[in-house]
Image (spheres, rainbow, N blue to C red):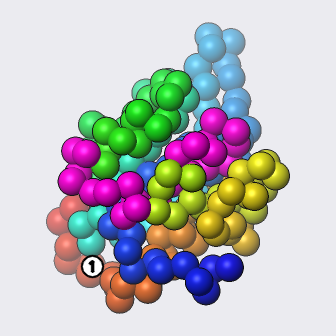
Amino acid sequence: MASEIDLTKIKGFTFDIDGVFTDGGILCDLSGELFRIFDAKDGFAVRMARMHGYPVGIITGGRSGSIRNRFLTCGVPQEDVYLGSRDKIVDFEDFCRRHSLTESEVSYSGDDIPDIETMCRSGLGFSPSDAVPEVKECADMVSSFPGGKGCVRDLIEKVLKAQGKWNFDVGKYKKLY
């Protein structure tokens, strides 16, 4: 199926967090603070996308400020991090509108039932290998990597390579990060 998909049309990326950037596990301390583990390779891929001018959006039901802080370090502007999202399609539409992109130009990556509508409306619905069956069924592409273990890198690298933009400029990287 992946060979039939035109990755050159993608001009922006949007992602769920839990189960995509993480393995879905959440640690909680006694005060209720939640902790997630992110894969550094996924973070680097987000930086590569941002370095090449792609808008990146985070659309998550999670509310932790640590999520916002994680993506600020990857060059994602604060206004592109949608915390506490209960209707992801509304936030996806806002992201597309603010970046003057059509829905068909933006990918959405998710792993569970609340992601299905947005995945189906996006130009490229993408899921980790361990997404729930209903999500994998509606996804245009399913990564060979599970959530939190490189599936974000997999998508971004494929899109940037298809567009001839998977190249690293150390000078630009040093300036931005």
Q: Residue at x 54, y 69 (%)?
A: 155
Find out whether residue 77 is within the magenta segment.
no
Label 1 CA crowd tier, 10 Å (few <14, some 14–19, many 20+): few
174 or 1: which is nearer to us?
Answer: 1
Tell me if residue 158 comes above or below residue 117 in the rendering.
below
Counting from the top left corner in percent of width and height, residue 9 is at 38, 74
Relative to residue 35, is residue 115 depicted above or below?
Answer: below
Is 9 on the left-hand or right-hand side of 112? left
Depth check: give the residue in front, 47 or 85.
Answer: 85
* 103 inside magenta stretch: yes
Q: Which quarter shows the C terminus?
A: bottom left
At a point 64% along the width and 69% down the height, the residue shown is 141
Which residue is denoted by mark 1 in the rendering? 170
Which residue does the image show at 36% across and 64% down from the upper left? Answer: 105
Please name the residue shown 48% across and 80% down the image: 6
Q: Left or right of 66: which side holds 119?
A: right
Which stretch appears magenta?
Answer: 97-119
Spot occupied by residue 19 in the image (x, y as percentages of width and height): 67, 46
Residue 164 spot, x, y in % from top left:
35, 89
Q: Amino acid at mark 1?
A: Val
Q: Is residue 6 above or below residue 81?
A: below
Kindly indicate the quadrant of the structure image that contains residue 35: top right
- Furthest residue in direction top, as rendered: 31
Q: Nearer the viewer, residue 33 or 159?
A: 159
Residue 109 occupies which quadrant of the picture? bottom right
Is residue 150 at least partly visible in the picture?
Answer: no
Is 19 positioned to the left or the right of 132 in the image? left
Q: What kind of element bears circle 1? A: helix
Q: Quadrant of the N terminus?
A: bottom right
In which quarter of the view is residue 16 placed?
A: top right
Residue 34 against residue 75 in the figure, above or below: above
> Looking at the image, can residue 110 be seen?
yes
